[in-house]
Amino acid sequence: MIYQMPLESRNIKASMIRPVLEHLDAGDPLPLVAYYLGDGVVRSDRLIISVSSKRMHLFEGRGDVSVDLKRKMVVFRLVSELYVRAVAELYLSGVGVLLDVLHSHKWLAFKRLAAQSLAGFQLAGQYVKLSSAKGLRGRVLFRTKGEAEKYAEAARRELEKLGIDSAPEVVASGIYYQVVFDEKTLTRLAEVDEAVKLAIERLEALFTPRIAAKPIVATRLDAKPERLVKPKAAAKREELPRPKTATPKVEPVDRVVFQLVDGFASMKLRLTYVMKEGRKMPTVNAVARFSMLEEAEKFRRRLRLSGVNASVVSKGASGFEVVVPKDELEKLTPEEKEAVKQYLEHVAQTEGEEKKKAAEEVLSRFDFGAKAVNIGGVRLRLVFKADRPPRAEKYGDPQLIAEIKTALENKLREILEEEYERWRDHIKTTEEGRRLVITRQLLERLAQRDPNTAKILNEKT
């Protein structure tokens, strides 16, 4: 006797696809991941599954699927939340670690698709997608070159407001154009923007295979930037009063005090991390906490008028932070940077092994020498080029540069007194007001009055 199986039982594939779609509609993506690991087609930008033409009817009427009858495949468009749930649950169950150990190329492809969906941030009105296939990059796609160039300029201005002197690149990509942010820009941006830092961490977590000893931190995948900092009572302003002649008081080991154009500032030092070249690198920032945005912006303006780039970061219920990154701290005088050195040495001597190594690495990379001149509280970077004499300069938004120039001229009037008119032409702006330049001759004249300026010029020449 020949037993004839029911039609549904004979069509095993069809009986499998239906519950996959039912689970997906209920918000459970795990059966779809299993389906993809079996019949999936690896593509860099789409979740594709190979399906026989006689089963295509099972996907009809779905808004999250595109059917390609000619190529016998379906393309799924998953929302970010489903990628989050799929990756997080597989790692929490241990299956994700096992797939990493087995070097499953489809699992790695799925995580890359998840990274593309999750790893991104908003900048200047557009969503920047991160990738790390050829080094850390951020990309925004446009149909025309004009649209791309317009956005690149808007992004440059936004970065400038955050204290980052960088311009994204416009490149052709087939019939489209991409605005590309390089790794250095993204690393600087991550130091001052928690959303960018989280996006890079997501990319790193999803893109890199894990071994059992180092499982992915699944809870980071669906974290929100404001959840990364534990709520605290809103702090008061972390700066000193603005004495005109007083010397700043001695501060705790985790604080740095430095001169501004209108007095002194005191900020808390913080050892933190940024993503660079696919790995987590330690760095040091200076931060000041405020309860009101207006206060934070006011303090940031004082820093910027003093030639120190900074950004304001929202911390949700905790208030706002003004953040000065490592590159800007290196503009301080060697005497002021001694506080940074003492802080890092203190961390290396008193904290656990991880923080000890991080502090030692930052100590080895931090430039404790002279990188800028301090003219009455205004910091200007020293520039040395083979085809021209050394000079001090500052690049930025024309309006900010004009304000810094005015503050600098006022300080020079106090320093040079009756000689000021003779030297005023040695303070110049170029590039349509974007670059402020102090000539070598004026620097040498200031060195005759200020031992610190003389010391800096002697060290650098």
Image: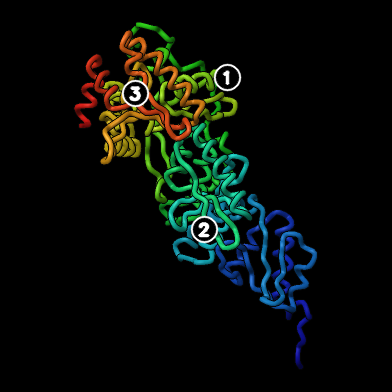
For residue 360, side relative to residue 261 (left or right): left
Marks 3 and 1, the one that precedes in the sequence: 1
Q: Look at label 2 and name its amino acid.
A: Gly
| Cα separation between marks 2 and 1 | 46 Å
Residue 197 screen position, x and y as percent? 49, 41
Q: Quadrant of the N terminus?
A: bottom right
| Rendered position, 247 above or below 183 | above
**Which numbered circle lies on residue 284?**
none
Judged by depth in the image, the label closer to the viewer, 3 or 1, is: 3
What residue is pinned by disc 2? Answer: 96
Q: Which residue is at the front of the view, 229 or 184? A: 184
| Cα separation between marks 2 and 3 | 63 Å
Q: Which residue is at the front of the view, 333 or 31? A: 333
What residue is pinned by disc 3? Answer: 426
Marks 2 and 1, the one that precedes in the sequence: 2
Judged by depth in the image, the label closer to the viewer, 2 or 3, is: 3
**Which numbered circle lies on residue 294?**
1
Q: Quadrant of residue 339?
A: top left
Q: Is residue 395 visible?
A: yes
- Residue at 57% of width from left, 19% of height from top? 294
* Label 2: few (<14), some (14–19) or many (≥20) C-alpha neighbours in 10 Å: many
Q: Look at label 3 and name its amino acid.
A: His
